Image (spheres, grey):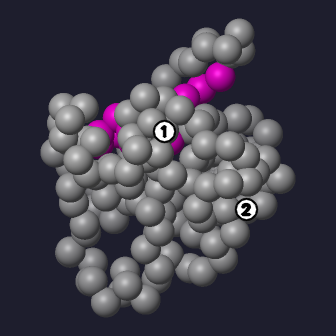
Amino acid sequence: MSSEPKTKVELSDAEWQARLTPEQFAVTRKHGTERAGTGPHLNEKRAGIYKCVCCGAELFPSQTKYESGSGWPSFYAPLDKNAIAELDDNSLFMRRTEIRCARCDAHLGHVFSDGPRPTGLRYCTNGLALEFEPEEETAARGPDQSSTA
């Protein structure tokens, strides 16, 4: 992944609704949460890259995905620390750290400090906020052809 900054993606709610399913819109744009164990990618085992469903930004490599037992896809590290924005979330009478796509502000989930080594972090994501690109498609695309919104 290139370390140069990508252009910020800013669309209206109507434009996001035209691009996303109602479920994806509710999770990514309205900060919803899919029910545990129901989202896509929970049992995905292939090598590849997890990208933002809204803008296509590359977020997590499959090598950092692990079974957390939470019912949501979990990762111990993003592909690039600049791909993920972290914000304080004090909703629902809890103190948590929300994670968003740094490129389009899509709500991805939350990060917790109960993950495995080497980071000790658990990026607990909504599967509806991610799309998966298998390694064979990434290789066929080539290094200079990252997908964009």
Quadrant of the rendering where the C terminus is positioned: bottom left
Which x, y percent locates residue 29? 38, 34
Badge 2 local density, few (<14 within 10 Å), some, or many (20+)?
some
Q: Is residue 147 above or below residue 8?
A: below
Which x, y percent locates residue 59? 44, 55
Residue 74, magenta (yes or no): no
- Give me the residue at 43% from left, 89% from top: 136
**Mark 1 is on which residue type?**
Val
Q: Secondary structure at mark 2?
A: strand
Residue at mark 1 = 27
- Residue sitting nearer the eye, 117 or 63: 63
Specify the segment rendered in magenta.
96-108
> For the stretch drawn in magenta, what is the main secondary structure?
strand
Is residue 69 visible in this depiction of the protein?
A: yes
Query: Mark number for residue 66?
Result: 2
- Residue sitting nearer the eye, 7 or 120: 7
- Give me the residue at 28% from left, 62% from top: 2
Q: Secondary structure at mark 1?
A: helix
- CA–CA distance between discs 1 and 2? 22 Å
Quadrant of the rendering where the N terminus is positioned: bottom left
